[in-house]
Amino acid sequence: MRNIKKQAPNNRPPKPAKKHDPRRQPGHNDEKSCTVPADGHLLDTLLTLFADRSRSTVKSWLAHRQVAVNDTPTTRYDQPVHAGDKIKINFRVGYKEFKNSQLRIIYEDDALIVVDKVSGLLSVSTDRIKTRTAYHILSNYLKSKDPAARLFVLHRLDRDTSGLMMFAKNQRVQEIMQHAWNEMILDRRYIAVVEGQPHPAEGEITSYLCENAAYEVYSTPDKTSGGQYALTRYRVLQGNRRYSLVELQLATGRKNQIRVHLKDIGHSIAGDRKYGARTNPLRRMALHASRLRFVHPLTRHDMHFEVPPPAPFRQVAHPHPETISATP
């Protein structure tokens, strides 16, 4: 007779059920792509595209960085989107964020990349500095996603100017933009802290700009000198006896145009020693590219971006500077 060995009772507790992840959508792939049907705001568009999902679910995707517009992750409910833009939703995890202390990506699609750079960062390389540039940082970022990716320069900001600038992601876009730059750039505005109080408080500055052997740009009264025509519009926003906060609109885009024109009217940009500044309250040149509006080279959409100047700009030009130190 065979001995049948009795099995010991299984006293181990049952395995706990897997915790439900509310961000994971049963029956769906981890990621879904869709095309924006009409101009609008991101949250409204998502609610239209995913009408079978609750508003709280869609807002949760945004809050957890699970939404990307034209491959750029975003958490903004009110972000403008345009017909034809590409939206991706990752139902499982949030998208990785591009992080760099000197550069912030504002917008990206297959054609362009718009960024906000800090003061002190070069736009492109020089003979002495090759890697600490906006161009190098963005090139590495694009190559991390696609080793064959390339970046193309559209315009530059001076090293000590902060704010908005853009690059092309292919040569065709670069050629389109550069061929019709004046027609496609609808509005470029800067915010500056200038020495003194410009009078009148609003006006235009015009001249013909030339450059000498020391790479210093200067104004001449007429084009007989071979200079390029330049027009800058300005408006004082606020100020005190020492400094004024001024908005500047470029009607032309010449090298160092704003810096030269403000020097011409006797109100140099604070911190701009090269063009006449006597003081440096912010320990940098107080010039910030605040607005960039242009026609998209492929979709022909009206693209509009704004980044406010750093808080110290308003503080140093506050109408009552003595109240700043008393503010907790």
Image (cartoon, rainbow, N blue to C red):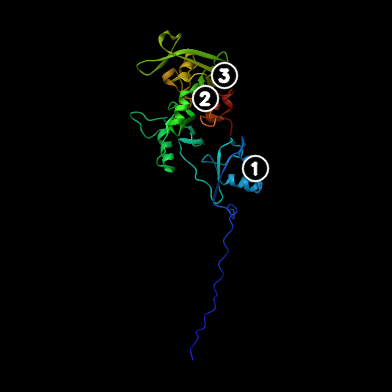
* Left or right: 159, with 53 as reference point: left
Q: Quadrant of the C terminus?
A: top right
Q: Position of residue 40 (x, y in %)?
A: 62, 35
Choose between 166 and 171: the one closer to the eye.
171
- Neighbour class for label 2 at 10 Å: few (<14), some, many (≥20)? some
Q: Residue furthest bottom?
A: 1
For residue 68, above or below residue 211: below
Residue 190 can be seen, yes or no: no
Which amino acid does the dot numbered 1 rest on? Thr
Label 3 vs label 1: CA separation? 42 Å
* Left or right: 95, with 128 as reference point: right
Q: Position of residue 322 (x, y in %)?
A: 57, 25
Secondary structure of the residue carrying tag 3 is strand
Q: Which residue is mark 2?
A: 184
Secondary structure of the residue carrying tag 1 is helix
Pick whichever of labels 3 and 2 is earlier in the sequence: 2
Mark 3 against mark 2, which lies toward the viewer? Answer: 2
Q: Which mark is residue 48?
A: 1
Choose between 118 and 296: the one closer to the eye.
296
Q: Position of residue 196 (x, y in %)?
A: 52, 17
Q: Which mark is residue 235?
A: 3
Which amino acid does the dot numbered 2 rest on? Met
Secondary structure of the residue carrying tag 2 is helix
Label 1 vs label 2: CA separation? 32 Å
